[in-house]
Image (cartoon, helix red, strand yellow):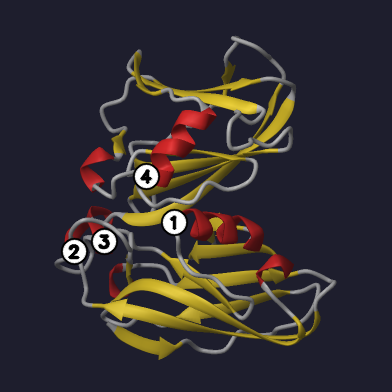
Amino acid sequence: MILNRLPEFNQVSAGRSSQLRIPPYALTLKAMELRFGGTSMNAGLITEMRLKLGTSTRWSATGAQLLMMNAYKSIPIDSLHLPVDFSERDARNIFAEEMGGWDLDQRKDPLYFEVDIASTAVAPTMYANAWFTPPQSGDKGKEQGQLVQKYVRATYQANATGNTRNQLPFDPKGSIIKRAFFTYTGTDFTPSADGNLNKLEVKKNGGIVWEPTCLDARASQTRYEKVPQSKVYVVDFMLDNNLSGALKTADAAALEFNAFITAADQITAIYDVLDKPYNL
Protein backbone atom coordinates (compact mmCIF):
# COMPACT_ATOMS: atom_id res chain seq x y z
CA MET A 1 0.00 0.00 0.00
CA ILE A 2 0.95 3.63 -0.47
CA LEU A 3 0.60 5.85 2.60
CA ASN A 4 0.34 9.59 1.95
CA ARG A 5 -0.76 12.66 3.84
CA LEU A 6 -3.77 14.19 2.11
CA PRO A 7 -4.04 17.90 1.27
CA GLU A 8 -4.83 20.09 4.26
CA PHE A 9 -8.39 20.82 5.36
CA ASN A 10 -9.55 24.25 4.24
CA GLN A 11 -10.03 25.21 7.91
CA VAL A 12 -10.02 23.51 11.30
CA SER A 13 -12.04 25.50 13.83
CA ALA A 14 -14.48 24.78 16.64
CA GLY A 15 -18.09 24.95 15.53
CA ARG A 16 -17.15 24.90 11.83
CA SER A 17 -17.09 22.42 8.93
CA SER A 18 -13.70 21.35 7.56
CA GLN A 19 -13.31 20.04 4.02
CA LEU A 20 -10.54 18.53 1.93
CA ARG A 21 -10.57 17.36 -1.67
CA ILE A 22 -9.11 13.92 -2.25
CA PRO A 23 -6.73 14.08 -5.23
CA PRO A 24 -7.84 12.05 -8.30
CA TYR A 25 -4.82 9.76 -8.30
CA ALA A 26 -4.81 6.69 -10.56
CA LEU A 27 -5.23 4.65 -7.38
CA THR A 28 -7.91 3.26 -5.08
CA LEU A 29 -8.60 4.98 -1.76
CA LYS A 30 -8.63 2.04 0.67
CA ALA A 31 -8.69 3.88 4.00
CA MET A 32 -8.11 7.18 5.73
CA GLU A 33 -7.08 8.17 9.24
CA LEU A 34 -7.78 11.46 10.95
CA ARG A 35 -5.02 12.76 13.22
CA PHE A 36 -6.09 15.13 16.00
CA GLY A 37 -4.17 17.75 17.97
CA GLY A 38 -4.66 21.04 19.76
CA THR A 39 -5.87 21.77 23.27
CA SER A 40 -9.03 19.66 23.03
CA MET A 41 -9.91 17.64 19.91
CA ASN A 42 -10.92 14.00 19.52
CA ALA A 43 -13.41 11.79 17.68
CA GLY A 44 -16.12 12.49 20.25
CA LEU A 45 -16.06 16.15 19.17
CA ILE A 46 -16.95 15.29 15.56
CA THR A 47 -20.67 15.81 15.12
CA GLU A 48 -20.71 14.63 11.50
CA MET A 49 -18.39 13.26 8.80
CA ARG A 50 -19.32 13.02 5.14
CA LEU A 51 -17.72 11.52 2.06
CA LYS A 52 -19.21 13.45 -0.84
CA LEU A 53 -19.14 12.57 -4.51
CA GLY A 54 -19.61 15.95 -6.09
CA THR A 55 -22.36 17.56 -4.01
CA SER A 56 -24.00 14.31 -2.87
CA THR A 57 -23.22 12.58 0.42
CA ARG A 58 -22.41 8.89 -0.14
CA TRP A 59 -21.05 7.94 3.31
CA SER A 60 -21.76 9.56 6.69
CA ALA A 61 -21.28 8.96 10.40
CA THR A 62 -20.64 10.88 13.60
CA GLY A 63 -17.35 10.48 15.40
CA ALA A 64 -19.04 8.48 18.16
CA GLN A 65 -20.75 6.21 15.64
CA LEU A 66 -17.50 5.46 13.82
CA LEU A 67 -15.73 4.77 17.11
CA MET A 68 -18.49 2.29 17.97
CA MET A 69 -18.32 0.50 14.60
CA ASN A 70 -14.52 0.34 14.69
CA ALA A 71 -14.60 -1.05 18.23
CA TYR A 72 -17.13 -3.74 17.20
CA LYS A 73 -14.74 -4.84 14.42
CA SER A 74 -11.77 -4.83 16.85
CA ILE A 75 -10.04 -1.97 15.05
CA PRO A 76 -7.63 -0.40 17.59
CA ILE A 77 -8.44 3.16 18.59
CA ASP A 78 -6.75 5.92 20.55
CA SER A 79 -7.52 9.54 21.36
CA LEU A 80 -5.31 11.00 18.60
CA HIS A 81 -6.35 8.88 15.62
CA LEU A 82 -9.65 7.91 13.97
CA PRO A 83 -9.49 5.20 11.27
CA VAL A 84 -11.93 5.59 8.35
CA ASP A 85 -11.73 2.24 6.55
CA PHE A 86 -13.59 1.67 3.29
CA SER A 87 -12.22 -1.88 2.99
CA GLU A 88 -12.93 -5.01 5.05
CA ARG A 89 -9.72 -5.54 7.03
CA ASP A 90 -10.48 -9.08 8.26
CA ALA A 91 -12.03 -10.51 5.09
CA ARG A 92 -10.97 -14.02 4.11
CA ASN A 93 -9.33 -13.06 0.80
CA ILE A 94 -7.80 -10.04 -0.89
CA PHE A 95 -10.77 -9.60 -3.23
CA ALA A 96 -13.22 -9.29 -0.35
CA GLU A 97 -10.79 -7.20 1.70
CA GLU A 98 -10.25 -4.49 -0.89
CA MET A 99 -13.75 -4.31 -2.31
CA GLY A 100 -15.28 -1.10 -1.03
CA GLY A 101 -12.37 1.20 -1.78
CA TRP A 102 -12.96 4.19 -4.05
CA ASP A 103 -11.22 4.21 -7.44
CA LEU A 104 -10.19 7.84 -7.66
CA ASP A 105 -9.63 8.28 -11.39
CA GLN A 106 -12.90 6.55 -12.30
CA ARG A 107 -15.13 9.29 -10.93
CA LYS A 108 -16.71 11.93 -13.12
CA ASP A 109 -17.17 14.11 -10.00
CA PRO A 110 -14.59 15.15 -7.37
CA LEU A 111 -14.46 13.33 -4.04
CA TYR A 112 -14.52 15.38 -0.83
CA PHE A 113 -14.25 14.52 2.86
CA GLU A 114 -15.98 16.84 5.32
CA VAL A 115 -15.78 16.99 9.10
CA ASP A 116 -18.09 19.02 11.37
CA ILE A 117 -16.32 19.97 14.61
CA ALA A 118 -18.29 20.67 17.79
CA SER A 119 -18.25 24.15 19.28
CA THR A 120 -16.81 22.66 22.50
CA ALA A 121 -13.49 21.78 20.83
CA VAL A 122 -10.63 24.02 21.99
CA ALA A 123 -7.98 25.22 19.50
CA PRO A 124 -8.37 22.02 17.44
CA THR A 125 -5.93 20.83 14.79
CA MET A 126 -6.49 17.97 12.36
CA TYR A 127 -5.05 16.40 9.24
CA ALA A 128 -5.67 13.18 7.31
CA ASN A 129 -3.46 10.34 6.10
CA ALA A 130 -4.65 7.89 3.46
CA TRP A 131 -3.81 4.39 2.26
CA PHE A 132 -3.94 3.72 -1.48
CA THR A 133 -3.86 0.50 -3.50
CA PRO A 134 -3.79 -0.13 -7.28
CA PRO A 135 -6.89 0.75 -9.34
CA GLN A 136 -9.72 -1.79 -9.22
CA SER A 137 -11.77 -0.80 -12.27
CA GLY A 138 -11.04 -1.28 -15.93
CA ASP A 139 -11.48 1.32 -18.64
CA LYS A 140 -12.33 4.87 -17.66
CA GLY A 141 -16.02 5.68 -17.71
CA LYS A 142 -16.98 2.33 -16.16
CA GLU A 143 -17.37 3.74 -12.66
CA GLN A 144 -20.82 2.18 -12.28
CA GLY A 145 -19.22 -1.26 -12.40
CA GLN A 146 -17.32 -0.68 -9.16
CA LEU A 147 -18.75 -1.38 -5.72
CA VAL A 148 -17.79 1.06 -2.97
CA GLN A 149 -18.43 1.06 0.76
CA LYS A 150 -21.12 3.35 2.14
CA TYR A 151 -22.70 4.04 5.52
CA VAL A 152 -26.39 4.86 5.11
CA ARG A 153 -28.24 6.07 8.21
CA ALA A 154 -31.88 6.25 9.24
CA THR A 155 -33.70 7.00 12.52
CA TYR A 156 -36.95 5.34 13.60
CA GLN A 157 -39.41 5.74 16.45
CA ALA A 158 -40.44 2.29 17.67
CA ASN A 159 -43.52 2.11 19.90
CA ALA A 160 -44.89 -1.45 19.53
CA THR A 161 -43.71 -3.66 22.40
CA GLY A 162 -43.70 -7.37 23.14
CA ASN A 163 -44.11 -9.70 20.16
CA THR A 164 -45.28 -6.94 17.83
CA ARG A 165 -42.95 -6.07 14.98
CA ASN A 166 -41.68 -2.52 14.49
CA GLN A 167 -40.93 -2.25 10.78
CA LEU A 168 -37.78 -0.25 9.99
CA PRO A 169 -38.17 0.76 6.33
CA PHE A 170 -35.01 0.73 4.24
CA ASP A 171 -34.70 0.62 0.46
CA PRO A 172 -31.24 -0.76 -0.39
CA LYS A 173 -31.76 -0.17 -4.12
CA GLY A 174 -29.96 -3.36 -5.05
CA SER A 175 -26.90 -2.82 -2.85
CA ILE A 176 -25.16 -5.58 -0.90
CA ILE A 177 -25.67 -5.32 2.87
CA LYS A 178 -22.62 -6.45 4.86
CA ARG A 179 -24.03 -5.57 8.27
CA ALA A 180 -26.29 -3.08 10.02
CA PHE A 181 -25.84 -1.40 13.40
CA PHE A 182 -28.99 -0.51 15.37
CA THR A 183 -28.41 1.81 18.32
CA TYR A 184 -31.14 2.39 20.89
CA THR A 185 -31.68 4.60 23.93
CA GLY A 186 -33.51 2.22 26.29
CA THR A 187 -32.21 -0.33 28.79
CA ASP A 188 -28.81 -1.77 27.90
CA PHE A 189 -28.09 -5.49 27.71
CA THR A 190 -26.21 -7.39 30.42
CA PRO A 191 -24.04 -10.52 30.10
CA SER A 192 -27.09 -12.67 30.77
CA ALA A 193 -30.00 -10.59 29.42
CA ASP A 194 -31.22 -8.90 26.25
CA GLY A 195 -31.25 -5.14 25.84
CA ASN A 196 -34.40 -3.15 25.15
CA LEU A 197 -33.99 -3.96 21.46
CA ASN A 198 -34.20 -7.66 22.21
CA LYS A 199 -34.42 -9.10 18.69
CA LEU A 200 -34.02 -8.00 15.09
CA GLU A 201 -35.70 -9.96 12.32
CA VAL A 202 -34.68 -9.64 8.67
CA LYS A 203 -36.89 -11.10 5.95
CA LYS A 204 -36.06 -11.33 2.25
CA ASN A 205 -38.83 -12.28 -0.15
CA GLY A 206 -40.87 -13.52 2.81
CA GLY A 207 -38.17 -15.81 4.22
CA ILE A 208 -36.33 -15.10 7.47
CA VAL A 209 -32.57 -14.61 6.95
CA TRP A 210 -31.74 -13.27 10.44
CA GLU A 211 -33.58 -13.54 13.78
CA PRO A 212 -31.35 -14.19 16.84
CA THR A 213 -32.10 -12.52 20.14
CA CYS A 214 -29.73 -9.86 21.42
CA LEU A 215 -28.06 -12.36 23.78
CA ASP A 216 -27.64 -15.02 21.10
CA ALA A 217 -26.35 -12.54 18.51
CA ARG A 218 -23.73 -11.26 20.97
CA ALA A 219 -22.60 -14.79 21.81
CA SER A 220 -22.04 -15.56 18.12
CA GLN A 221 -20.25 -12.28 17.52
CA THR A 222 -17.90 -12.84 20.44
CA ARG A 223 -16.92 -16.27 19.09
CA TYR A 224 -15.87 -14.56 15.85
CA GLU A 225 -13.80 -11.95 17.73
CA LYS A 226 -16.27 -9.14 17.33
CA VAL A 227 -16.86 -6.89 20.33
CA PRO A 228 -20.53 -6.14 21.23
CA GLN A 229 -21.10 -2.47 22.01
CA SER A 230 -23.34 -0.86 24.63
CA LYS A 231 -26.92 -0.25 23.45
CA VAL A 232 -26.20 -1.58 19.96
CA TYR A 233 -27.74 -4.58 18.19
CA VAL A 234 -25.71 -5.70 15.16
CA VAL A 235 -27.06 -7.68 12.23
CA ASP A 236 -23.82 -9.05 10.78
CA PHE A 237 -24.12 -11.06 7.58
CA MET A 238 -20.30 -11.16 7.39
CA LEU A 239 -19.92 -12.45 10.93
CA ASP A 240 -17.39 -15.09 9.79
CA ASN A 241 -15.59 -12.54 7.56
CA ASN A 242 -16.82 -14.23 4.36
CA LEU A 243 -18.14 -11.81 1.76
CA SER A 244 -20.28 -14.61 0.33
CA GLY A 245 -22.53 -14.27 3.37
CA ALA A 246 -23.39 -10.61 2.70
CA LEU A 247 -27.06 -10.04 1.89
CA LYS A 248 -27.62 -9.48 -1.82
CA THR A 249 -30.70 -7.34 -2.44
CA ALA A 250 -30.71 -7.05 -6.24
CA ASP A 251 -33.09 -10.04 -6.35
CA ALA A 252 -35.18 -8.92 -3.36
CA ALA A 253 -38.78 -8.25 -4.31
CA ALA A 254 -39.40 -7.57 -0.61
CA LEU A 255 -37.04 -6.80 2.27
CA GLU A 256 -37.99 -6.22 5.91
CA PHE A 257 -36.08 -5.16 9.02
CA ASN A 258 -38.32 -5.75 12.05
CA ALA A 259 -37.35 -4.68 15.57
CA PHE A 260 -38.74 -6.24 18.75
CA ILE A 261 -38.53 -4.05 21.85
CA THR A 262 -39.51 -4.19 25.50
CA ALA A 263 -40.34 -0.46 25.82
CA ALA A 264 -40.83 2.36 23.31
CA ASP A 265 -37.50 3.52 21.94
CA GLN A 266 -35.73 5.56 19.30
CA ILE A 267 -33.60 3.44 17.00
CA THR A 268 -30.85 4.74 14.74
CA ALA A 269 -29.70 2.38 12.00
CA ILE A 270 -26.37 2.51 10.18
CA TYR A 271 -26.40 0.24 7.13
CA ASP A 272 -22.91 -0.86 6.00
CA VAL A 273 -23.31 -1.60 2.30
CA LEU A 274 -21.43 -2.19 -0.94
CA ASP A 275 -23.04 -0.13 -3.66
CA LYS A 276 -22.48 1.50 -7.02
CA PRO A 277 -20.98 4.99 -6.53
CA TYR A 278 -23.99 6.95 -7.80
CA ASN A 279 -26.79 4.71 -6.46
CA LEU A 280 -27.62 5.19 -2.75
Q: CA–CA distance between discs 1 and 4? A: 13 Å
Q: CA–CA distance between discs 2 and 1? A: 18 Å
* Amino acid at pointer 1: Lys
Of the numbered discs 1 and 4, the one sitting upstream in the chain is 1
Residue 174 image offset from top left, x and y in percent: 33, 36
Determine the image quadrant of residue 188: top right
- Are the residues flagged by discs 3 and 2 in contact, CB closer than 8 Å? yes
Identify the residue at horizontal 28%, vertical 50% (top origin): 241
Establish if 83 lies above or below 251.
below
Q: CA–CA distance between discs 4 and 3? A: 21 Å
Residues 187 and 167: in front is: 187
Q: Decide: few, some or many residues near mark 2? Use Cα within 10 Å; few <14, some 14-19, many ≥20.
A: few
- Are the residues flagged by discs 2 and 4 in contact, CB closer than 8 Å? no
* Amino acid at pointer 2: Ile
- Residue on which disc 3 sits: 97
Secondary structure beneath dot 1 equals loop
Query: What's the mark number on residue 223?
Result: 4
